[in-house]
Image: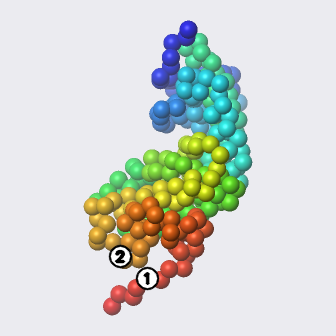
Amino acid sequence: MAPRLTSFNLPPGRKLGSRYVVETLLGVGSEGEVYEIREVDTGIRRAAKLYFPHRDPRRRTIIRHAQKLDTLRYCPIVLQYHHSHEVIVRGQKVLAMVSELCKGDQLERWIARHRGGRLSPFEALHVLYALAQGLEAVHSLGEYHADVHSQNILIHPVGVRFELKLLDFYDWGKPTRWKQQHDIVDCIRVFVECMGGRTHYGKLPKEIRYIACNLRYNTIIRRFPTMSALRRHLERFEWEVLE
């Protein structure tokens, strides 16, 4: 029996099959490792997630994930999947999912670089609005994400807006309304995290606290039963005029 691979540690310059060369490691997770790679013939850079073979020996989860990304290929918040690519690492067959290489920083790190390690309420609203818009498109196609958190979001500020990309969709099986509502609650949690979490919650404007719902699951779902309802509220709510 082949030894279990729990890390790849691929160095820069290492070839992945005949088409790609490793540039750098981008991230490590329980399922595998993500690398920036370069296409040998064109020099185009892409991202490749290499999966640990023992985590999904029959590749069913990987295949479902690729099919979901293909279904959502017209949703701007979703990474654009290109193709799968089998490579040999330490004598074992490893499947890599090749996708676009996106600009942006991990949201958690981006927040930490701001003064006090948090965003202003208005900046946080823009992040939440971009999330709600993006996931509204995902939900409209009958899908869900199920793992929305600040480590799974790439943010790229452009002008007066934020461009976001969601990473690592989690497979909870058949889509349901409950799973989509879980995405809504996760978005609100990210929103509060952007502003410093519960430590600073009491000092937030009442309009912001109304949206945050004190992070109570049932209250969030009652006020915003769908991602569209959340997006509409963000577009229409009025601020109290401060004298």
Give me the disc on residue 239.
1
Where residue 218 sits: x, y (%)?
46, 63
> Residue visible at 52% across and 30% down?
32
Where residue 243 sits: x, y (%)?
33, 91
> Residue visible at 35% across and 76% down?
205
Question: Considering the numbered disc 2 on the image, is that residue within a helix, a strand or a loop?
Answer: loop
Quadrant in which the N terminus is drawn: top right
Residue type at mark 2: give it: Pro
Where residue 28 sits: x, y (%)?
47, 33
Where residue 173 sits: x, y (%)?
62, 43
> Residue visible at 51% across and 12% down?
3
Above-or-below relation of 38 to 187:
above
Position of 219 with respect to 201 (left or right) is: right
Tell me how far mark 1 sits from mark 2, CA to CA.
9 Å
Callout 1 touching callout 2 (CB < 8 Å) = yes
Above-or-below relation of 205 to 50:
below
Dot 1 or dot 2, earlier in sequence? 2
- Residue linked to disc 2: 205
Residue type at mark 1: give it: Trp
Question: Considering the numbered disc 1 on the image, is that residue within a helix, a strand or a loop?
Answer: loop
